[in-house]
Image (cartoon, rainbow, N blue to C red):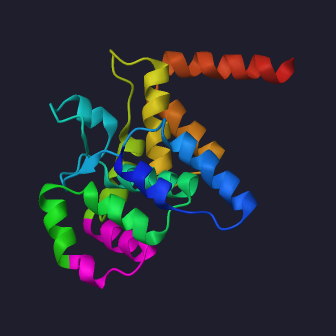
Amino acid sequence: MTTYSSAVTNNNGSSGGEANNSIKATNLVRFLNDPKDFSGQVIATRSERRCIATNSKIEHNPLVWLKKLERLRDLARLSDKDLLLIAADHLVGKAEIWFDFTYSTILSWSEFWAIFKKKYCTGLEDIWWSYIYNKKQQENESVEDVDIELRELYSLVGLKDEHMMIRHFMDAIHKSNACEVERKSEIGRHT
């Protein structure tokens, strides 16, 4: 049984409705992958990871790792204690050593979140914005590849403004593709 499956199984609901929801969450969690380990080695985006031979069991983006744990917490209704146990179990290398030194000061998941982000995410948002502003479609990239990479970056920086997302996307793709996208959107507006 996976670490978080064990935590969910031990996480009891108190009332009948909560118990049913807890059972549903437990059953659903069985189908999820274990979160990857985090070592403290940071690689900012998935496209960078393609260029580097890495262990597929290690997550190199600290914010992606945190978001995965948040989804587990929300789905399985884990307590702070259970979620911290899972997080600690999936920290390896330098990150594990860092956690061993800081664990005694951490009382809640929100404290862990803040301390972890300060340690491993400082400066990454600037890097992600730089990638957004400087992204240009490469010869071997499809428009969809550019869209997927930009959407990951938008998620990482918390960009929600649809007009800004479209503007950055249009700036990133080849001009001929951008003209085609604009032409199709004009046709869509007039029908």
Residue 114 in percent (x, y) is at: 38, 73
Depth check: 40 or 107 in front? 107
**Residue 93 within the magenta-colored segment of the rendering:** no
Residue 124 in percent (x, y) is at: 32, 57
Q: Main secondary structure of the magenta part?
A: helix
In the image, residue 71 sits, relative to residue 52, either above or below, namely below
Residue at point 45% right, 53% down?
67
Residue at point 34% right, 64% down?
85
Number of marks in the rendered image: 0
- Image position of 140 (left or right of 179): left
Depth check: 65 or 24 in front? 24
Residue 141 in percent (x, y) is at: 37, 19
**Residue 106 within the magenta-colored segment of the rendering:** yes
Location of residue 27 by image quarter: top right
Q: Residue furthest right?
A: 191
Location of residue 191 by image quarter: top right
Residue at point 32% right, 54% down?
62
Q: Quadrant of the N terminus?
A: top left
Q: Is residue 81 visible?
A: yes
- Per the rendered image, the range of residues in magenta is 102-119
Residue at point 52% right, 17% down?
177
In the image, residue 14 sits, relative to residue 90, either above or below, namely below
- Image position of 93 (left or right of 107): left
Residue 161 in percent (x, y) is at: 63, 50
In the image, residue 55 sits, relative to residue 154, either above or below, namely above
- Image position of 135 (left or right of 21): left
Q: Is residue 174 visible?
A: no
Q: Residue furthest bottom?
A: 105
